[in-house]
């Protein structure tokens, strides 16, 4: 192998070394193109994409090249020695050129006690450079299962996007005459359900309950989507805002149809199917869930044998006091003493 004589490399770019690298063993003509390609690939590794072409290799990439090409050993060629070698060759610069890189390999070969051609051969034989290690994401149902996507994620028309403009709201299709009365009756029933006083319009709570009772929910049409549809439909024309200076919190029947149209788009079905499901429950009304009290012997049994002694005394004393008002005070004292 031939040692290349000293040469001077002067770079106009700031951050490059301009001193004479010194003597180094040049790679063979067959290995030279591979060595050059390896140097350029590691020089660009980790750099921000889209910037100007990077010239020269940093210390970080020089150490990574030695690791990926398995040049290190435990005794002599360590990462600490690589850092010292880079600083010796670069002499204060941030990057080294290809010629400086060959000099650094020559110094590494001297420290390792071998010829530089052996390091060249290892670099040429390592075709998988640079090695990239990254974390592999685990399976996520909400990301991998596209049936759980909303209309916006599926790339379809997303009527539930941000914005209060009524121009982005769809025009509802009114129910046919066969189910129109049933839908109106369901709206009126759920409009009054759970309210303590007469109210105008349907609240968000009752709108969600109507969807649950009519079994409209699925993977796409969730409670969150219903809340978004309700909030969006409040901006539709034909609302109840004319009755008060503030925007009404409830939906009118026309806005209720707009909310159903938004749900239809998100659900991906026909609006007639939603009207049919709602109208089919017009005769049954809202589902009422309440706690049924358990059997209590002392409450449910009216026989005197199950009453407590205090209850017997109170009943008998009250009966006697009703016949003789003058004994009212003594009866109260007797009950208090017990």
Image (cartoon, grey):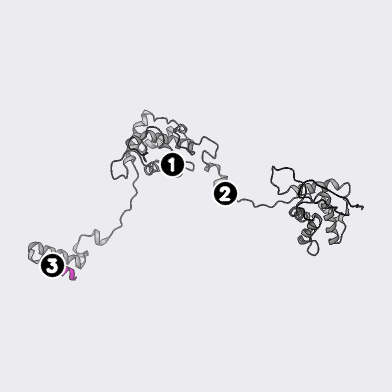
**Which residue occupies the foreground of this view, 91 or 236?**
91
Per the rendering, the mark at residue 326 is none
Per the rendering, the mark at residue 140 is 2
Secondary structure at badge 1 equals helix
- Is 206 on the left-hand or right-hand side of 25? left
The kind of secondary structure the magenta stretch mainly shows is: helix
Mark 2 or 1, closer to the camera: 1
Judging by the rendered image, the residue that carries numbered circle 3 is 331
Region rendered in magenta? 332-338
> Is residue 134 located in the magenta-colored stretch of the structure?
no
State how far apart marks 3 and 2 are (Cα).
74 Å
Q: Mark 3 or 2 closer to N-term?
A: 2
Q: Mark 2 or 1 closer to N-term?
A: 2
Secondary structure at badge 3 equals helix
Judging by the rendered image, the residue that carries numbered circle 1 is 226
x%, y% of residue 311? Answer: 19, 65
**In the rendered view, would you say 324 is above or below 267?**
below
Residue reaching furthest to the bottom? 337
x%, y% of residue 36? Answer: 82, 47
State how far apart marks 3 and 1 are (Cα).
62 Å
Which of the 4 image quarters holds residue 146?
A: top right
Residue reaching furthest to the top? 177
**In the rendered view, would you say 106 is above or below 314?**
above
Query: Is residue 319 shown to the viewer in this render?
Result: yes
Counting other residues with Cα less than 10 Å from the Cα at mark 1, is it few (<14), some (14-19), or many (20 or more)? many
């Amino acid at each position: 192998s031939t040692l290349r004589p000293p040469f001077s490399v002067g770079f106009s770019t700031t951050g490059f070394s301009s001193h004479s690298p010194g003597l180094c063993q040049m790679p063979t003509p067959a290995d030279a193109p591979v060595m050059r390609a390896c140097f350029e690939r590691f020089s660009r590794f980790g750099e921000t994409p889209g910037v100007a072409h990077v010239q020269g290799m940093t210390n970080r990439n020089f150490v990574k090249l030695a690791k990926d090409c398995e040049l290190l050993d435990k005794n002599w060629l360590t990462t600490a020695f690589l850092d010292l070698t880079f600083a010796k060759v670069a002499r204060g610069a941030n990057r080294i050129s290809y010629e400086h890189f060959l000099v650094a390999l020559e110094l590494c070969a001297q420290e390792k006690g071998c010829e530089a051609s052996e390091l060249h051969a290892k670099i040429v034989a390592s075709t998988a450079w640079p090695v990239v290690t990254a974390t592999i994401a685990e399976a996520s149902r909400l990301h991998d299962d596209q049936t759980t996507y909303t209309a916006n994620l599926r790339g379809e028309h997303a009527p539930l996007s941000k914005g209060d403009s009524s121009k982005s709201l769809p025009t509802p299709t009114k129910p046919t005459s066969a189910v129109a009365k049933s839908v109106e009756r369901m709206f009126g029933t759920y409009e009054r359900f759970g309210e303590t006083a007469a109210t105008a319009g349907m609240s968000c709570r009752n709108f969600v309950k109507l969807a649950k009772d009519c079994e409209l929910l699925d993977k796409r049409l969730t409670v969150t989507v219903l809340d978004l549809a309700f909030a969006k439909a409040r901006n539709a024309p034909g609302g109840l805002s004319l009755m008060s200076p503030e925007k009404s919190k409830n939906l009118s029947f026309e806005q209720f149809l707009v909310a159903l149209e938004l749900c239809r788009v998100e659900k991906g079905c026909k609006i007639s199917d939603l009207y049919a499901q709602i109208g089919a429950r017009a005769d049954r009304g809202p589902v009422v869930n309440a706690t049924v009290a358990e059997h209590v012997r002392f409450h449910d049994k009216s026989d005197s044998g199950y009453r407590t002694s205090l209850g017997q005394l109170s009943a008998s004393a009250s009966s006697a006091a009703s016949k003789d008002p003058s004994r009212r005070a003594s009866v109260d004292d007797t009950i208090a003493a017990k």
